[in-house]
Image (tube, grey):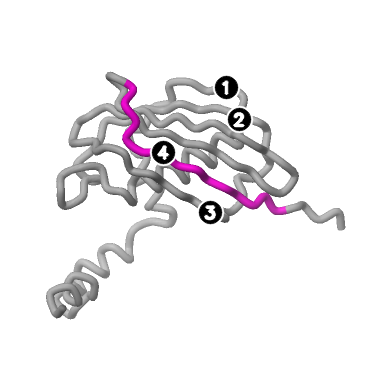
C-alpha cells in the first residue's frame, strides 16, 4: 500500500520536478501529445492524421499510453467539428475508448475522426486509432460534446 501511495503522491524530493512541470507554458499538454502529428486527409466531417509513436507517449509497458490515446481522441475529434464550420469545439460531455491492441515506439499510427452528428447543442464524433501499415484497430473512441449556444443579447 505504501508503495502505491508513494507512486501517486509528490514528496519533498520531487519539488524540483514539480516546479519544473508547473513552469511549463499554458496549453502545454496538447502540444506534448500532438507534436509531430501530420494531417493526411481533411474533408467535411472527417480528418485523418498520422503519428509515429514517440517515446514521450509510452507507458511502463513501452506501448502507447491509454491517456495519450484518449487525448488524441479528444483533440482530433474536436478539430473534426471545425471541418463542418462549427463555431466552437465545445466541451466534452463524454469520452469512451475501447483499447483493442497496442502500438509501440516508432510505430506509425493513423487517427481517423468522423463527425457522426453535429446538432445545435450536441456533437458526436467517432475516432479510430489504427496501425497505418495494415489498418488494424488499436483503439476506438466515441466523443460527445456540448456546443454552447451563443447569446443573442
Q: Quadrant of the N terminus?
A: bottom left
Give the SS element for disc 1: strand
Distance between the alpha carbons at the discs numbered 1 and 4:
20 Å
**Pointer 4 residue:** 140
Distance between the alpha carbons at the discs numbered 1 and 2:
7 Å
136 drawn magenta: yes
First of labels 3, 4 by sequence position: 3
Q: Nearer the viewer, mark 1 or mark 3?
A: 3
Q: Where does the image place residue 146, in percent across and percent down from the top left?
A: 64, 52
Q: Nearer the viewer, mark 2 or mark 4?
A: 4
Give the SS element for disc 3: strand
Number of marks drawn: 4
First of labels 2, 4 by sequence position: 2
**Pointer 3 residue:** 94
Which residues make up the magenta segment? 135-148
Asked which quadrant contains residue 31, the reply is top left
First of labels 1, 4 by sequence position: 1
Q: Quadrant of the C terminus?
A: bottom right
Q: Is residue 132 above or below residue 70?
A: above
**Pointer 2 residue:** 83
41 drawn magenta: no
Distance between the alpha carbons at the discs numbered 2 and 4:
21 Å
Q: Is residue 29 above or below residue 134?
A: below
Q: Residues within 10 Å of mark 4 (few under 14, many from 20)?
A: many
Give the SS element for disc 2: loop
**Pointer 1 residue:** 43
- Left/right of residue 53 with respect to residue 84 in the rendered view: left
Residue at image position (51%, 39%) is 77
Q: Where does the image place residue 27, in percent across and percent down from the top left?
A: 43, 53
Distance between the alpha carbons at the discs numbered 3 and 2:
21 Å
Distance between the alpha carbons at the discs numbered 1 and 3:
24 Å
- Left/right of residue 65 with respect to residue 83 in the rendered view: left
Amino acid at each position: 500500500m505504501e508503495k502505491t501511495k508513494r507512486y501517486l503522491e509528490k514528496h519533498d524530493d520531487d519539488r524540483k520536478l514539480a516546479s519544473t512541470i508547473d513552469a511549463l507554458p499554458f496549453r502545454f499538454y496538447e502540444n506534448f501529445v500532438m507534436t509531430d502529428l501530420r494531417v493526411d486527409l481533411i474533408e467535411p466531417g472527417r480528418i485523418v492524421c498520422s503519428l509515429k509513436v514517440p517515446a514521450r507517449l509510452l507507458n511502463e509497458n513501452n506501448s502507447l499510453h491509454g491517456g495519450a490515446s484518449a487525448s488524441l481522441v479528444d483533440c482530433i475529434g474536436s478539430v473534426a467539428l471545425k471541418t463542418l464550420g462549427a463555431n466552437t469545439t465545445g466541451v466534452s460531455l463524454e469520452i469512451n475508448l475501447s483499447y483493442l491492441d497496442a502500438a509501440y515506439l516508432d510505430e506509425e499510427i493513423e487517427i481517423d475522426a468522423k463527425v457522426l452528428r453535429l446538432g445545435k447543442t450536441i456533437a458526436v464524433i467517432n475516432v479510430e486509432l489504427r496501425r497505418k501499415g495494415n489498418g488494424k484497430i488499436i483503439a476506438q473512441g466515441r466523443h460527445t460534446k456540448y456546443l454552447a449556444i451563443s447569446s443573442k443579447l
